[in-house]
Every structure is written in C-alpha cells, then in structure tokens.
Amino acid sequence: MTVSNAGAYASSSYLANAYGRSTATGTAAAAATANATADTTSASDKSDAATVVTLSAAAQAQLAAAETTNEAADKPASSNAVVADARAAIDALYTKAKVAAAIVDGKQTIDLGGLDRRSLYAIANNTGGQFTADEQKIAKKELQERFDAVLAPRVAVAELTGDWNRVYQAALDHMKQAGPEEKESPTYKAQLAALEKAQQAALNKPGTMPSVKDDPVGAYVARMKAAEQDDVVRDFGDVASAARTKLDRQIEAAAAKGRDLIFNSARRVGEMVDFSDFDNRSLSAIALNEGKQFSGEEVRAAKLELDQRTRQTLLTAFEQAGSTSDPASFSLGLLYSYQSMSAEERQVMNFTTDLRDMAVSQYRTTSSVISMLQQAAGGGGSIFG
C-alpha cells in the first residue's frame, strides 16, 4: 500500500495530527514579563527582602488568552472540520492525479493512505453528504486494509504458537485509536465488546481460537481462508513480468536524459535504479530470475535491496524485543518477520522452515516457563522447591 501525503493538501492542520497539542510559543509569557511591575517591600525585622511581582492588566489578559488557546488545542477538531479537510484532501488528490473520480474503468485512481483514521471514517460513512459512492468505497477499503495489516503477522504467528491473546490485544489497541464519531457507532461498540469477550476466552483456553459473534478477528481469518481457496495470489511469472516492465520504464526515462540506468552506487555516471516502488515479492522475482528476464546486474541489485530490507525488518524486531520485558519477544520478532515474507522472499534470503520451527519451539518453551512462574507466584509458592 503506497502512502501519499494527502495531509499536505488539507485546509487545516487536522489531517496531520487530529489530536495534537499546540506548542506554546512563549509570546504571552514574554509579554507578561515585559509588562510586569515589581513592588519590593522591605521587612524591618528580617535581613532578606521579599519581592512581590504584580502583572499589569494587559499581561494578565494575554496569559488568560494563552490558556484559552491551549485548552482549545487539547480538544479534537469538530466533525464539520474533519469533513471539510477530508473533502479538500480528496479534491487535491484528484488535481494531482489529473482525474475526476476515485474509480475509473474499475481501477482506483487515488490513494487515501495519507489520511488519518477519523477522516477515512467520515468519508466511508458519507458524513455531511460530501462524498461519492466510489470515495466511500475506497475509504472503507483503506480502513479495512489498515486493520488487516495489524492482524496479518499476528494471526499467522498465532496459528503456529496457539497464542491468540496477543492477536486480540493488538486488535483492541487498534480499535481504541478510533475517533469520537466512530466510537459512538453501534458497529464499533459491538466489535469492541466482541474483542474483549474473545480475548478473555483466549486467556481461559490457550491454544484455541475463540468463536464470538461480531468478532472482527474471526471475520478476518474467515476472509483469509476464503482467499486461499480462491487462489488469489498473483502468479509469480506475472510478478516478474511486471517488474521487468517497471525496470524498462526506468531505463527509457534515463535514456531520455542521455544517461544509462545503473545498478551499482560505486559507478559515478548514470541514473541510479530506484526500487522504492518495488514490493519485496517483485524484488524476489528479479533476484530468482526464473524466467531469465533480468541481467546479472539487475539480479545482484535486487538481492542487495531485498537483503537490506530484510535486515532492517529483523533489526526492528530485535530492537522491539530489547525494549520490552517480555522474554518471548525475541522469538515473536523472528516469527513475525518469517510470516510477513512471501515464499519467494524466504527462498532468496534462505529463511528456512527450520529457523521458523526453532523460533516456535523457543516461544513455547519461554511461554511455558512464564506460565509456571506466574502460577507459582499466584499460589504463594516457588517452582524451585
């Protein structure tokens, strides 16, 4: 999912931070200092003088205005402001993409990835009657994709470890980031209650996925199973062909400037290849080069890019594990990384099932020890004697 900075087109700062606090500039405080008068009274029976600072009426008024401004900044934007900003953001995206509709010939023309959740909710529900049916459709799709992105690696890991509690905690954390309008909706309230009930069931019966009405996690799992049955994964040969087309466009664009497209930063002359628009599966297609469509330079460059991305993913997982007191975080980091890769990525990076199984075993052992310690502590005893 490509993320556009749609917030830059909004008519106010809401899209950038719906709940942001304004930082005091100090103007009022400076004015107060400039307008303050000091009355110094000397006490005859004390050696130290007491200083009393009295603010002028103008300074007091400025301080009061500053406090009012800060209080207003603490409040979320009004629903009308959210709608207006969302409408302006979409219109600006149309202008940038040189289109007039969100879907043309069955294809989405704009990306709402830069809008925050509250704006997307307003669009999806046509708040104020300001949005077209297609705009509502792609906003709902974006909201669903964000929720799915939270669940995807965690569900995949839960299916290996049996730990569904973490899945439901992540889902609850995501749900609670909703804006005030969404939190008032019947759907939100039903799903939140279902998630809380399901999490408790996961804690009461570890290793089993809960079955609860209105559970969005259950709905996600059902959709993913249906997708697997429909075999919607794009053919790997098609992925390679699309990657070839993207590279050819870059080669043509460089040639139009009288330059070569280069794949090694050590070369000083030429236009460096840009892999930012290639997902990891596309890079894997180039690196494996099963259809012999790519040159040796292209293969090496794709492998290097994929290696750097994988290293960064693993590093992030390890850093997160080091920042928490959860002993199982290290194993979870490995599992999340493994499950987020396509089969082709794992092949290129030699991320084998043996490594995955080792991480699963380590996670289960750690979780078992933690459970024993918790039970011993709860019973007032010790597992060591």
Image (spheres, rainbow, N blue to C red):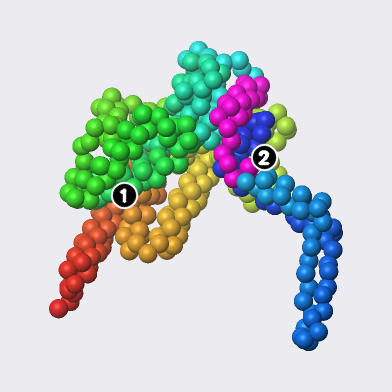
Q: Answer whether labels 1 and 2 touch (C-beta < 8 Å).
A: no
Name the spot of residue 319 as percent of width and height, x first.
Answer: 45, 60
Q: Position of residue 252 (x, y in %)?
A: 64, 28
Name the residue: 82% across, 79% down. 42
Q: Residue 247 has which mark? A: none
Q: Identify the mark at residue 271; answer none if there is no mark.
A: 2
Residue at image position (76%, 53%) is 60
| Residue 99 visible, this orientation | yes
Q: Nearer the viewer, mark 1 or mark 2?
A: 1
Q: Which residues are magenta?
A: 72-96
Residue depicted at 22% across the width and 62% down the height: 371
Q: Secondary structure at mark 1?
A: helix
Query: Mark 1 — residue?
Result: 166
Give the quadrant of residue 342: top left
How would you rate the neighbour count of disc 2 (Cα within 10 Å): few for under 14, some for 14-19, many for 20 or more?
many
Which sits in the foreground, 174 or 157?
174
| Residue 221 in the image, given as x and y percentages of width and height | 28, 35
Picture quadrant of residue 114:
top right
Q: Which residue corresponds to the image point at 37% horizontal and 54% vertical from the top-left?
A: 333
Q: Amino acid at mark 2?
A: Glu
